[in-house]
């Protein structure tokens, strides 16, 4: 007697390829995005440290704030960020502002990512 073939078990080849393509695209985007998030969080941390040390060891001049910030960037190995910040005297204190652009390549389009952070030292 001939027996009928059993029902297929597991995923088909096309479904497997689609799943692998989606996972590959997610990994491709993640490899670009995760370093940008880490860089942004590092700058947040540097600004928080500047703000907290302002209470115990106040910075009173723009030059002192700038040199302290450059030192913190160098400790975090972020020397390329030294051209992306400004330190100026403002109303009520010293203003530190970071502004920089990154790009996220999504294969079909490139999405510009703009990061802007500001801190006022009193």
Image: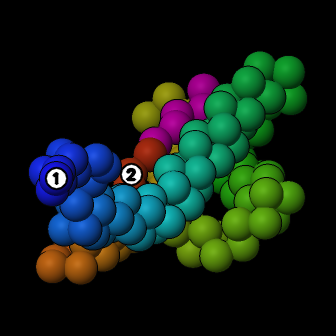
Residue 119 magenta: yes
Please tell me which of labels 2 and 1 falls first in the chain.
1
Which color scheme does this rendered protein use?
rainbow
Picture quarter containing residue 100? bottom left
Q: Is residue 33 left or right of residue 74?
A: left
Please report the residue visible at 44 percent of the width from the left and 46 percent of the height from the top: 117
Q: Is residue 42 left or right of residue 5?
A: right
Can you tell which of label 2 and label 1 is closer to the viewer? 1
Q: Is residue 100 visible?
A: no
Write the start and end of the magenta stretch as one range. 118-122
On the image, the x and y values in percent for residue 25 come to 32, 67
SS of the residue under disc 1: loop
Identified at 15% across, 56% down, the residue is: 2
Q: Residue 3: x, y in percent?
A: 17, 51
What numbered label is drawn on residue 116?
Answer: 2
Q: How many marks?
A: 2
Q: Please name the residue shown 58% across and 43% down the image.
A: 41
- Based on the displayed image, in which of its 4 quarters is residue 28 positioned? bottom left
Is 112 magenta? The answer is no
Quadrant occupied by the C terminus: top right
Judging by the rendered image, the residue that carries numbered circle 1 is 1
Q: Which mark is residue 17?
A: none
Is 111 displayed left or right of 65 in the figure? Answer: left
| Percent x, y of residue 35 | 56, 60
Using the image as rendered, state which of residue 60 and residue 2 is in the foreground: 2
Query: Callout 1: few (<14), some (14-19), or many (20+) C-alpha neighbours within 10 Å?
Result: few
**Disc 2 secondary structure class:** strand
């Amino acid at each position: 007697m001939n027996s009928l073939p059993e029902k297929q078990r597991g995923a088909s080849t096309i479904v497997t390829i689609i799943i692998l393509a989606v996972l590959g695209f997610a990994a491709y985007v993640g490899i670009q995005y995760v370093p940008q998030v880490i860089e942004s969080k590092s700058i947040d941390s540097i600004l928080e440290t500047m703000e907290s040390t302002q209470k115990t060891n106040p910075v009173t001049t723009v030059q002192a704030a700038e040199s302290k910030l450059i030192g913190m960037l160098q400790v975090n190995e972020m020397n390329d960020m030294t051209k992306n910040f400004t330190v100026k005297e403002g109303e009520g204190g010293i203003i530190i502002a970071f502004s920089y652009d990154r790009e996220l390549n999504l294969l079909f389009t490139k999405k510009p990512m703009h990061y802007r952070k500001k801190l006022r030292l009193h």
